């Protein structure tokens, strides 16, 4: 079936509802002398027809009653919408929770309409007797139809404007939270007050928990800092973003302070595997984890981690990534004082880089310097000096290229 056919079916389906919603009339007498009252059906069979003319003054009380019922439905709809929205953002904030709230809203809305329809039916029967169910199709001039449609669209625009203001206010509050924590002297008290206001009306966002974790860390409450940081990570989707490197580095540091280095590594493994990452991102994450493991005295699995990543890359036959993983592995072996293992890797990487200068020319000086320091550790000073000279790095700058352990610290992010 073509797309145009689907569009026609959708338009045909929605047309009676739109026509019913736009038309504000509740009663009319047609050319055949039938009096028709509008009932609470949203689509077809939305008229209660009498085979007689009922004067407007006699129908007045019924119409007033119909208007009262309409107001009750409107008020109930507003109430149930706000109630379920608050339930959703505070208790059921998930895709399943959204579906559940939508189902409850539909059930509640149509239940109250059915109840009002029954009350209206009883009032009609009591006042005018039995009626015939028919379509509510008053004769309306094109000018009136345009007027009704225009009035209806104004209502729609008004509701859209209210929603726009409501959403805009959430962005204003988020901006105020960011402003208070990004200042040179962060005001966490103000940020927390604004966060409390925000979470009363809008779904919780990861940023609020990250800021709370940061505040807990500064105050020395590492246990709560870890809990809040994990809550923040749980709220993110599977997409990996550039800022996640900082987030995961901070997770390691906070978790170490709270519950030890091994638990920190376990949490890191758990949450990084939830993300959809490419090889380049996996390499950077492994670097962060390995540096942390070595600095924390837990280097037993560092070499295995690099071997596992190499295996996954080798299966894709990606020589470029394989080269950089080997380079990082050599760096980590140096930090682990496995100098012979590091030297063996440098002895393979440097000739390969020289053979493929179009890809790795910029890496050759660094690798030569690192190999030079590795040779120094095994007392091969002649070989070390030879590598330093070949690297053509200024001897006053060469010390910067020695592999060093970067001890983890908490990185204060910009929100």
Image (tube, helix red, strand yellow):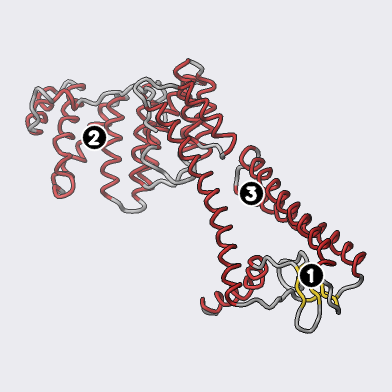
SS for tag 1? strand
Mark 3 is surrounded, within 10 Å at the Cα level, by few (under 14), some (14 to 19) or many (20 or more) other residues, namely: few
- Image side of residue 361 versus residue 307, left or right: left
Q: Please report contact status of discs 3 and 1: CB closer than 8 Å, yes or no.
A: no
Q: Residues within 10 Å of mark 2 (few under 14, many from 20)?
A: few
Give left or right: position of 50 versus 284: right
Looking at the image, is mark 1 or mark 2 earlier in the sequence?
1
Residue 74: percent from left, percent from top: 70, 53
Q: Which mark is residue 37?
A: 1
Q: Residue under label 3, please give it.
A: 96
Kind of element beneath mark 3: helix
The C terminus, quarter of image: top left
Above or below, 410 relative to 327: above
Answer yes or no: is residue 65 visible: yes
Per the model, the C-alpha gap separating discs 3 and 2 is 54 Å
Residue drawn 81% across and 63% down? 60
């Amino acid at each position: 079936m073509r797309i145009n056919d689907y569009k026609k079916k959708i338009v045909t389906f929605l047309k009676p509802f739109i026509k019913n919603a736009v038309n504000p009339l509740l009663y009319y007498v047609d050319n055949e002398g039938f009096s028709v009252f509008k009932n609470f059906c949203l689509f077809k069979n939305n008229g209660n027809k009498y085979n007689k003319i009922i004067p407007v003054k006699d129908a007045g009380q019924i119409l007033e009653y119909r208007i009262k019922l309409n107001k009750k439905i409107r008020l109930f709809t507003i109430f149930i919408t706000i109630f379920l929205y608050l339930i959703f953002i505070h208790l059921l904030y998930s895709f399943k929770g959204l579906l559940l709230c939508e189902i409850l809203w539909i059930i509640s809305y149509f239940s109250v309409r059915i109840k009002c329809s029954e009350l209206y039916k009883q009032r009609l029967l009591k006042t005018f007797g039995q009626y015939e169910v028919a379509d509510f199709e008053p004769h309306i001039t094109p000018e009136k139809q345009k007027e009704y449609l225009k009035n209806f669209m104004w209502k729609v625009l008004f509701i859209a404007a209210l929603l726009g203001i409501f959403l805009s206010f959430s962005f204003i509050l988020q901006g105020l939270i960011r402003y208070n924590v990004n200042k040179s002297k962060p005001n966490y008290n103000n940020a927390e007050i604004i966060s409390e206001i925000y979470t009363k009306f809008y779904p919780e966002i990861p940023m609020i928990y990250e800021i709370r974790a940061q505040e807990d860390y500064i105050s020395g409450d590492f246990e709560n800092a870890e809990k809040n940081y994990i809550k923040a990570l749980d709220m993110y989707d599977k997409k990996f973003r550039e800022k996640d490197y900082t987030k995961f580095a901070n997770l390691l540091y906070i978790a170490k302070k709270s519950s030890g280095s091994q638990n920190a590594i376990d949490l890191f493994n758990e949450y990084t595997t939830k993300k959809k990452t490419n090889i380049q991102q996996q390499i950077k994450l492994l670097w962060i984890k390995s540096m942390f493991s070595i600095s924390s005295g837990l280097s037993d699995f560092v070499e295995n981690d690099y071997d596992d990543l190499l295996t996954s890359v080798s299966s894709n036959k990606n020589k470029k990534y394989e080269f950089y993983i080997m380079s990082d592995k050599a760096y980590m072996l140096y930090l682990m004082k496995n100098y012979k293992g590091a030297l063996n890797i440098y002895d393979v990487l440097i000739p390969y880089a020289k053979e493929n200068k179009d890809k790795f020319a910029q890496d050759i000086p660094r690798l030569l310097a690192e190999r030079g320091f590795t040779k120094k550790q095994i007392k091969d000073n002649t070989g070390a000096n030879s590598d330093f000279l070949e690297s053509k790095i200024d001897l006053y700058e060469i010390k910067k290229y020695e592999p060093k352990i970067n001890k983890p610290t908490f990185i204060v992010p910009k929100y």
